[in-house]
Image (cartoon, rainbow, N blue to C red):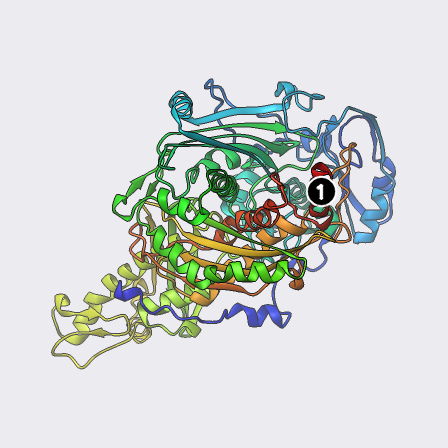
């Protein structure tokens, strides 16, 4: 792997642009003179629309267009935003009720878009929306994640969208009956609101007979295909672009109703139209994350080895199938069902339910954090009930290094792993040996300290195919066209650095081009931690073609046989020739000779296997029993990401993921009232973690290079969140265990923790 040993902690080049206010986000790039869209949204969670009067709004000052669902239908627009479904256990398809671009006959959650108003100014559009007359007849609300309750969709009796299963249910049941010991724990995984720094937005504009949509997304091709289908256009007549994006986290990976409506308006009016969400609007309309309850059960033999694992889950889909809503807690959850433990007898049963809340979909990790949270919580509980050290129980059940490649019970093939080595390293980095002394010191001050361990593994998801194109430009620079999409991860730095490492072209001369369906034939976008691995694999293939193409040309210049020409990652060389051109020099020679065929190179390749990042998180929390305040005092991560291109960026990704995990675990609390009203629809009520909620986060790389790709890399974008949830929750459980508290569920807000401790004290009296 010598070729990939150049990894250096290079600072992100794009940050200069972002930090000096020169970023070009979607609201910065809207065409001059674009009209403004505003969406009139439902203020109730469930109701029949009995009357909708938009006549006054259409006559309001500055208004150019008012659009309802009936208007879209009359224009031939396909109103339905389809979402993926899964198969039920009986072989039938999961429910697929219509999700309209604009509500037509019924509203099903607060914030659902009903009417779009387009005007000269945002103020005029909002004022016109105030003139809309809406009559509704309230319907009963369903908020429970269980079968029954008022019907939301006729296609889903009892509001159950699907009943899905994976594994051998009978064998698992038999293993439990034969077990020496069993352990069970109910585990709630609370809903979060994603809250990317930049809310969602878009603009659309006619370009001749074509239509251009720019939006805040994580890939252009899915949006392009869906938009063309909805509007009845040919895909080649639709251009989709993504400018700078201020955070995505999975929430921006899918299409939303506003994008279709704005595109329709631009096409109808023949003028550019823009829309940008405000924060409360985002909280009411962006897909939420997580929101499930699981019962996890482990069966053990007399030697404390796990013989079977069973999980039954009920998950909240919200009011509709979002684009990936059904697969998240089923297919994606199952990817890492058994984590890093050597167990082949498993059963996962999942039921999904509709509720009168905002739809739920992918959030950083998309199913993998949920699965690891459940597994590592019940592993911690098992250690306590069996009277074992939680570190030792994990070691006893790890997949041994000599068992790789290892096929899991759910069909994944882990290529490599040395989990005990990583766990031993994190014990040193976290000073696990000193924990008892720290706990005793805190106890002397009336405080409760707990330590939590989580060992996670993540499955890289998304399209394993990707392409790259390298163009030598006239100004002496080089452009690399990529099919992934940065949402703040530092792709401009990483991709330029990797191409530079492989070609010797200075990174400062390399320009990364992304997010334009006209410039890039196809791509898988960003999601599932796929970007760096698949994109750089495509870059390697492209560099190989570059070398292959330039070799015979330069051999002629050198006066040698082509077989004697080699490229040493910086220069072309051949014995017997003093000519040693760099790639840039070779390109200039080709340009001077009119060899334009040597100035553009591209390749598209597929990774035949996925990589599996893994690692250990150790959290230490301090609880003040008088106030219930939980403070994360120490946090240590040791990760196996394989070979790193840029350790600095990898560490930044881990830090960001851990902070989002701390937020979900301690501060972020989504609350709907009994009428389906979101009570936490502003930052006054929804608490994102602040700097003083987060400790210094130790990060150490302990690589076991992947064999699934030639670079030996493993993705890192979601790993921080995958490990953080259980590490924090297990630490809280550890802190309160001696007080007799046996059920702890996120978020660990002061009131919730204080109440747990108080109720325990009352029960003990």
Point 38% across, 54% down: residue? 714
* Corner quadrant of residue 608: top left
For residue 738, say whether it is visible. Answer: yes
Q: Which residue is mark 1?
A: 761
Question: Looking at this view, is 454 or 722 the one in front?
Answer: 454
Outermost residue, bottom side: 578
Placement of 278 over or under 76, stated as above or below: below
On the image, the x and y values in percent for residue 516 come to 51, 54
Q: Residues within 10 Å of mark 1 (few under 14, many from 20)?
A: few
Question: Looking at this view, is 333 or 637 the one in front?
Answer: 637
Question: Looking at this view, is 258 or 285 the one in front?
Answer: 285
Placement of 461 over or under 709, stated as above or below: above
* Corner quadrant of residue 162: top right
For residue 526, say whether it is visible. Answer: no
Q: Secondary structure at mark 1?
A: helix
What is the total number of numbered labels drawn onto the structure image?
Answer: 1
- From the viewer's perspective, tell me whether residue 43 is left or right of residue 725: right
On the image, the x and y values in percent for residue 405 come to 28, 44
On the image, the x and y values in percent for residue 613 come to 40, 51
Point 64% across, 29% down: residue? 145
The quadrant of the picture occupied by the C terminus is top right
Question: Looking at this view, is 591 or 483 the one in front?
Answer: 483
Point 58% across, 59% down: residue? 440
The quadrant of the picture occupied by the N terminus is bottom left
- From the viewer's perspective, tell me whether residue 729 is left or right of residue 556: right
- From the viewer's perspective, tell me whether residue 327 is left or right of residue 76: left
On the image, the x and y values in percent for residue 515 come to 51, 55
């Amino acid at each position: 792997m010598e070729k990939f040993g150049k990894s250096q902690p290079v600072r992100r080049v794009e940050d200069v642009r972002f930090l000096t206010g020169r970023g070009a986000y979607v609201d910065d790039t809207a065409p001059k003179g674009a009209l403004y869209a505003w969406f009139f949204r439902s203020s109730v969670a469930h109701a029949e629309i009995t009357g909708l009067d938009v006549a006054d709004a259409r006559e309001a000052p500055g208004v150019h267009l008012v659009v309802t669902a009936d208007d879209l239908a009359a224009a031939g627009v396909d109103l339905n935003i389809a979402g993926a479904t899964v198969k039920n256990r009986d072989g039938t398809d999961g429910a697929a009720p219509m999700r309209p671009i604009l509500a037509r006959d019924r509203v099903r959650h607060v914030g659902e878009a009903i009417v779009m108003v387009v005007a000269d100014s945002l103020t005029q559009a909002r004022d016109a929306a105030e003139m809309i007359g809406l009559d509704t007849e309230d319907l009963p609300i369903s908020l429970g994640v269980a079968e029954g309750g008022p019907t939301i969709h006729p296609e889903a009796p009892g509001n159950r969208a699907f009943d899905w299963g994976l594994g051998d249910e009978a064998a698992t049941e038999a293993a439990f009956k034969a077990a020496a010991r069993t352990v069970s724990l109910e585990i709630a995984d609370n809903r979060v609101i994603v809250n990317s720094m930049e809310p969602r937005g878009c603009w659309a504009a006619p370009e001749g007979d074509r239509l251009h949509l720019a939006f805040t997304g994580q890939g252009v091709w899915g949006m392009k295909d869906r938009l063309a289908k909805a509007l009845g256009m040919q895909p080649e007549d639709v251009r989709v672009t993504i400018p700078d994006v201020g955070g995505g986290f999975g929430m921006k990976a899918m299409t939303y109703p506003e994008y279709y409506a704005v595109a329709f308006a631009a096409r109808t009016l023949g003028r550019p139209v823009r829309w940008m969400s405000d924060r409360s609007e985002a909280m009411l309309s962006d897909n939420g994350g997580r929101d499930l309850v699981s019962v996890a059960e482990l069966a053990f033999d007399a030697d404390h080895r796990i013989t079977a694992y069973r999980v039954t889950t009920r998950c909240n889909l919200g009011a509709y199938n979002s684009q990936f809503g059904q697969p998240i807690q089923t297919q994606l959850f199952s990817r890492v069902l058994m984590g890093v433990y050597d167990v082949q007898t498993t059963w996962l049963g999942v039921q999904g339910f509709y509720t009168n809340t905002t739809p739920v979909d992918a959030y950083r990790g998309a199913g993998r954090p949920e699965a690891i949270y459940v597994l590592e919580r019940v592993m911690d509980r098992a250690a306590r009930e069996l009277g074992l050290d939680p570190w030792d129980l994990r070691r006893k059940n790890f997949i041994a290094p000599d068992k790789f490649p290892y096929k899991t019970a759910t069909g994944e093939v882990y290529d490599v792993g040395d989990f005990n080595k990583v766990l031993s390293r994190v014990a040193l980095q976290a000073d696990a040996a000193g924990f008892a002394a720290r706990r005793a010191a805190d106890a002397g001050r009336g405080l409760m300290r707990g330590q939590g361990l989580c060992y996670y593994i993540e499955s890289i998801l998304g399209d394993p195919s990707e392409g790259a194109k390298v163009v030598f430009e006239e100004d002496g620079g080089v452009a690399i066209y990529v099919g992934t999409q940065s949402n703040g991860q530092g792709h401009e730095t990483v991709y330029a650095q990797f191409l530079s490492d492989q070609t010797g072209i200075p990174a400062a001369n390399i320009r990364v081009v992304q997010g334009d369906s006209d410039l890039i034939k196809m791509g898988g976008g960003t999601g599932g931690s796929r970007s760096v691995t698949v994109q750089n694999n495509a870059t390697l293939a492209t560099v190989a073609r570059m070398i292959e193409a330039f070799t015979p040309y330069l051999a002629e210049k050198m006066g040698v046989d082509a077989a004697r020409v080699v490229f040493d990652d910086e220069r072309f060389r051949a014995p017997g020739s003093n000519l040693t051109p760099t790639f840039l020099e070779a390109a200039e020679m080709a340009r001077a000779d009119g060899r334009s065929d040597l100035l553009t190179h591209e390749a598209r390749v597929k990774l035949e296997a996925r990589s599996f990042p893994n690692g250990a998180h150790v959290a230490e929390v301090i609880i003040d029993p008088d106030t219930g305040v939980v403070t994360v005092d120490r946090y240590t991560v040791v990760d196996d990401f394989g070979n790193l291109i840029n350790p600095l960026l990898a560490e930044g990704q881990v830090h960001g993921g851990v902070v989002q995990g701390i937020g979900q675990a301690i501060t972020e609390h989504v609350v709907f009232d009994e009428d389906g009203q979101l009570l936490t629809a502003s930052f006054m009520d929804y608490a994102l973690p602040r700097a003083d909620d987060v400790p210094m986060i130790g990060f150490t790389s302990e690589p076991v290079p992947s064999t699934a790709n030639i670079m030996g890399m493993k993705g890192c974008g979601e790993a921080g969140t995958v490990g953080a949830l259980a590490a924090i929750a297990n630490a809280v459980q550890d802190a309160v265990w001696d007080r007799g508290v046996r059920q702890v569920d996120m978020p660990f807000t002061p009131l919730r923790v204080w109440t747990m401790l108080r109720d325990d004290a009352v029960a003990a009296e």
